[in-house]
Amino acid sequence: MSSIVVLRQTDRVSVLTDGAAYRNDGTIVGENAKVYALPHLNAVITVRGSQAAFAMIAGWLTCNVFAYNDLRHSLPEILSVLTPADGAGETIEVVVAGFTNAGGADSFFIVNHDRHPEAPILKALTIGGISMMPGGDSVKVAVEPLFPVPMTNVDQLDPEEIGLAIMGAQRQILDDVPGLLRAAKAHLVGRFAQMTSIYRDHIDTRILKRWPDPIGDKINPNVLN
């Protein structure tokens, strides 16, 4: 599924997402931003799953949640509505990043499935200083040389440099295409890398990089810019 990279530092939380929209076979049909800002909550959300589910979740939160701390309790409610009791629906993973009511940097995620053993279904799980989906050994090997030695905390890291390195490695991964009808695996991280940064007093976002992934074709991560 889509790329989500979170780097939580003392003064900001950076969320990087890709922009590829694709069919069930991995063919690109367009591009779109996959992060939604909630300025009144000093937060952003992003979703791995269908854009229809993303739109429903974002719209519901905009109208029904009025403080950052309430997100941990409200998200399970809307996700439960989107999750059939028989578990036959599509998988949805929601990542939230921002600043709590007390002013501390925060990030967590909630899933509606059991594919992540460490994540209880429909319960908020705090994520560490660096989080990446998809992950795996290949991604870790690609970014380890960028970490300072010794590294005492994540405030030492450059979110743009680390984020782009992680996403570059994620482009090589064959991942599951989201949806009810899963076809073959495909390369799913593409079109562009967007970084959204949440500070205590503002949110900003920009495109860091574009990849030459043609609409109407599948992603080839080995094609150079």
Image (spheres, rainbow, N blue to C red):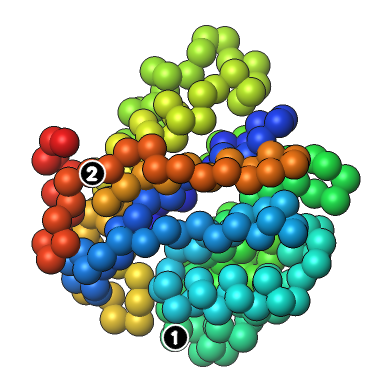
Q: What residue occupies the far top of the structure in this picture? A: 149
Depth check: 205 or 149 in front?
205
Q: Is 200 on the left or on the right of 129, as rendered? A: right
User: Along the polypeptide, which appears first: circle 1 or circle 2?
Assistant: 1
Which residue is the site of mark 1? Answer: 88
Name above or below for residue 98 compared with residue 65. Answer: above
Mark 2 lies on a secondary structure that is loop
The answer to whether residue 76 of the structure is visible from this angle is no
Name the residue rendered at 41%, 73% in the picture. Answer: 50
Name the residue rendered at 51%, 13% in the picture. Answer: 148
User: Residue 119: image x %, image y %?
Assistant: 60, 59
User: Residue 189: image x %, image y %?
Assistant: 30, 51
Which residue is the site of mark 2? Answer: 211
Q: Is 122 on the left or on the right of 212, as rendered? A: right
Q: Is 133 on the left or on the right of 15, as rendered? A: left
Hey, which quadrant is residue 27 in on the image?
bottom left
Name the residue rendered at 55%, 79% in the picture. Answer: 56
Mark 1 lies on a secondary structure that is loop
Name above or below for residue 48 compared with residue 52. Answer: above
